[in-house]
Image (tube, rainbow, N blue to C red):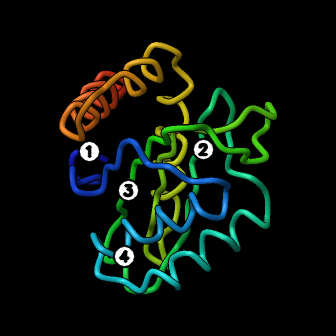
Amino acid sequence: MNIGDLIDRSAIALRVSTANKRQTLAVIAEIAARNFGLDGGDILDALTEREMAGSTGVGHGVAAPHARLDGMERMRGVFVRLEHPVEFDAVDDQPVDLLFALFAPKDAGAEHLRALARVSRLLRQAEVRERLRQARTADAIHAILVREMDAARPSAA
């Protein structure tokens, strides 16, 4: 999985202002709908349903919402950085300001889980989180994600 294939610069939003988890998921759904050509309401429903099963707040101000969607041809991502962190029922009870949402086809198998694990590992790194919080443009965020994901990719022996 190449992060450059997973997330387009147009699916990266900075300086987003929301008041709560539901509004944050709605913004992610809106960005995903615009970029993937799917219905925003369906995307929001899928994200909300997944959150009801358990929070995707993984700690350190990070969440990795995800959903499988009808109409998706391949795995795609959305990255959002919030102006002000919101409560997200994260595992460490800390509010969230960095969100990397993953969307997979309804019939996606282990690839979806592998991608989710890679994103989660990447965002556990304090230095990466700090650089993502300091980046000023979508291009800068994209470059950080691509560089770090490539660096974290296991090499073939």
Amino acid type, mark 1: Asn
Q: Secondary structure at mark 4?
A: helix
Amino acid type, mark 3: Gly
Q: Are marks 1 and 2 in contact (CB under 8 Å)?
A: no
Label 4 to label 1, Cα distance in Å?
A: 22 Å
Name the mark on residue 63: 2
Q: Are marks 3 and 1 in contact (CB under 8 Å)?
A: no
Residue 132 picture location, percent across and down: 39, 27
Seen in the picture, residue 11 relative to 150 is either above or below; the reply is: below
Q: Is residue 14 visible?
A: yes
Say which residue appears at 21% left-offset and 50% top-offset. 9
Q: Which residue is mark 4?
A: 33
Label 2 to label 3, Cα distance in Å?
A: 13 Å
The quadrant of the image that shows the C terminus is top left
> Of the residues under marks 2 and 3, which one precedes in the sequence?
2
Crowding at dot 3, Cα within 10 Å, few <14 / some 14-19 / many 20+, comes out as many
Quadrant of res 47: bottom right
Name the mark on residue 2: 1
Judged by depth in the image, the label closer to the viewer, 4 or 1, is 4
> Of the residues under marks 4 and 2, which one precedes in the sequence?
4
> Of the residues under marks 1 and 2, which one precedes in the sequence?
1
The residue nearer to you, when weighing 107 against 140, is 140
Q: Secondary structure at mark 3?
A: strand
Q: Is residue 156 visible?
A: no
Say which residue appears at 65% left-offset and 26% top-offset. 60
Quadrant of res 3: top left
Crowding at dot 1, Cα within 10 Å, few <14 / some 14-19 / many 20+, comes out as few
Label 4 to label 2, Cα distance in Å?
A: 19 Å
Residue 129 picture location, percent across and down: 47, 23
